[in-house]
Amino acid sequence: MKFRNIALATAALSLAASPAIAEAAFERSVAPVEGESELEGGSGILIAVLAAAAVIGGIIIIADNDDDDPVSAG
């Protein structure tokens, strides 16, 4: 029973400490940048256009006349 508790404690400690050890073992190197991205700011405009289209589409759907008369069999 004591060996099982010691094994569980050791496993828990190793799982808790492994991210800190891995972070200390590796250093990230930064790649040199030659030029800037040409898409800078372009995605914001695209998102704004899509959002405006969604709002306009929602208004059209809500304001649509519901003149559809149900067709009954009898």
Image (cartoon, rainbow, N blue to C red):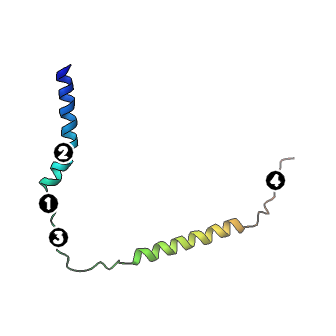
Residue marked by disc 3: 31
Of the two numbered discs 1 and 3 in the rendering, the one whose residue sits closer to the viewer: 1
Mark 4 surroundings: few (<14), some (14-19) or many (≥20) residues within 10 A: few
Looking at the rendered structure, the secondary structure element under dot 3 is loop
**5 shown above or below 57:** above
- Of the pair 31 and 64, the residue shown nearer to us: 31
Along the horizontal axis of the image, is 20 left or right of 40? left
Q: What's under tag 2, amino acid-wise?
A: Ser
Image location (x, y in percent) of residue 70: 80, 54
The residue lying at 35 percent from left, 78 percent from top is: 40
Q: Are marks 4 and 3 in contact (CB under 8 Å)?
A: no
From the top left corner, tell me how far across and down residue 18 is, in percent: 18, 45
Q: Count residues near mark 1 (Cα–Cα under 10 Å), then give few for <14, some for 14-19, many for 20+.
A: few
Q: Earlier in the sequence, mark 4 or mark 3?
A: 3
Residue in view at x 53 percent, y 70 percent: 51
Tell which residue pokes out farthest to the top in this image.
1
Q: Quadrant of the N terminus?
A: top left
**Location of mark 2 (residue):** 18
Q: How far apart are the alpha carbons under marks 4 and 1?
A: 71 Å
- Per the rendering, the mark at residue 27 is 1
Residue 63 picture location, percent across and down:
72, 68
Labelled pair 2, 4 in contact (Cβ < 8 Å): no
Hey, what amino acid is under mark 3? Ala
The residue lying furthest to the left in this view is 25
Residue annotated with mark 4:
71
Residues at marks 2 and 4, CA–CA distance in whole angstroms: 68 Å
| Crowding at mark 3 (Cα within 10 Å: few <14, some 14-19, many 20+) | few
- Please say if 29 is above or below 74: below
At 39% from the left and 78% from the top, the residue drawn is: 41
